[in-house]
Amino acid sequence: MGKFIASRLTDPPSEDHREPFPILSLPEQLVEYILSFVPAECVVRDCPFVCEQFRRIVDSNAFWKMKCERDGKVIPSFQLDPLPKRYYRMIYLENPYGRNLLRNSQGDCREGEFAHWEVTTEMGDGWRVESFPVGADSLPLESQSCFATSFGPCIKEQVIDLVREGVACEILDTFKPPIEISEWYAARIDCGGVYHLMVELIDIAHDQVAIFDTGEITTPQWMGRRWKQVKHTFFDYPSGVRYVRFAHLGRDTQFWAGHYGAKMAAGVVRIAAEQTPPCPATTKGRLEAAGNRTLWQCNTRRFPMAGQQ
């Protein structure tokens, strides 16, 4: 799209003598508004190379805030002054607030059953992904996929880089938004199981600054089957947090060959943030704010809006 706009600015008049749309002659606020409808991947890839004005616009916080509001991205209500560079751009591209930052939490990722995980221990018959929980109740979720463990300890972990996911360092250090953790676990009805979850907050020096540890949760034989959810929220943690390490363990209690150990599914790591109510502005409002009422009236005659035909 950006390349198309560039060509419209530089191409000679067409054979039917129509001139290219003179976008650079418009007020900058209107140019900004027009560009806000360009798909984000084109904005990032093409628009900065069209001209200096385009580059300045698409590198501004105001531009990306407009796109966030229009497309329903979660904008946290934190008040930062000054705003970090590309603050709203990161929110738009990564959408870090309110979504699950843990990837492939049920083994149903198209990139592979254990994509995004590091398997650190795989004893017994190792890890397995079940499309439906064998020997246990259905998950209280739409997807029924889960991880199953064996007769020796099975451990895997995932480290989440919060800044890479789009959370500004200033937000983490100043406002310390709650970090919500949860996961479902179950044992089989015919075999006892052990489940253990440990989640660490890690700083820029890769030191642990906060931890949530369930310890080993043992479900005896014939007492399993039902899914339970473990939850925790980190509040008021030290400044400097940049990573979340999510690690879980499972095994059985009877040393049976196969995958009779604890099951786990749908782990969650989420940054909780109160959302700022969106206040999208209309094209007319932006033009009038810039004092260009005459241009607005002129352009509505040339390009009538719906209902004004």
Image (tube, rainbow, N blue to C red):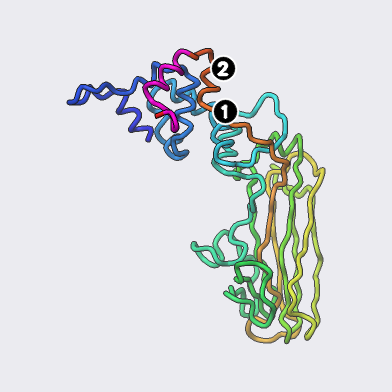
Q: Position of residue 198 (x, y in %)?
A: 75, 60
Magenta stretch, overall SS = helix
Q: Position of residue 260 (x, y in %)?
A: 68, 82
**Amino acid beneath label 2:** Ala
Observer-nearest of 161 and 181: 181
**Amino acid beneath label 1:** Ala
Q: Which mark is residue 289?
A: 2
Q: Is residue 254 above or below residue 13?
A: below
**Which image quadrant is residue 255 in?**
bottom right
Q: CA distance from mark 1 to mark 2?
A: 10 Å
Which quarter of the rendered picture does the N terminus lie within? Answer: top left
Q: Is residue 298 magenta?
A: yes
Q: Residue at x 44, y 33 (%)?
A: 306
Q: Residue at x 75, y 64 (%)?
A: 197
Which quarter of the rendered picture does the C terminus lie within? Answer: top left
- The range drawn in magenta is 294-308
Q: Residue at x 54, y 26 (%)?
A: 60
**Which image quadrant is residue 182 in?**
bottom right
Q: Position of residue 251 (x, y in %)?
A: 71, 76
- Whether residue 96 appears in this view of the structure is yes
**Which image quadrant is residue 118 in?**
bottom right
Q: Which residue is mark 1?
A: 281
- Are discs 1 and 2 less than 8 Å apart at CB? yes
Observer-nearest of 298 and 265: 298
Position of 185 with respect to 108 (left or right) is right
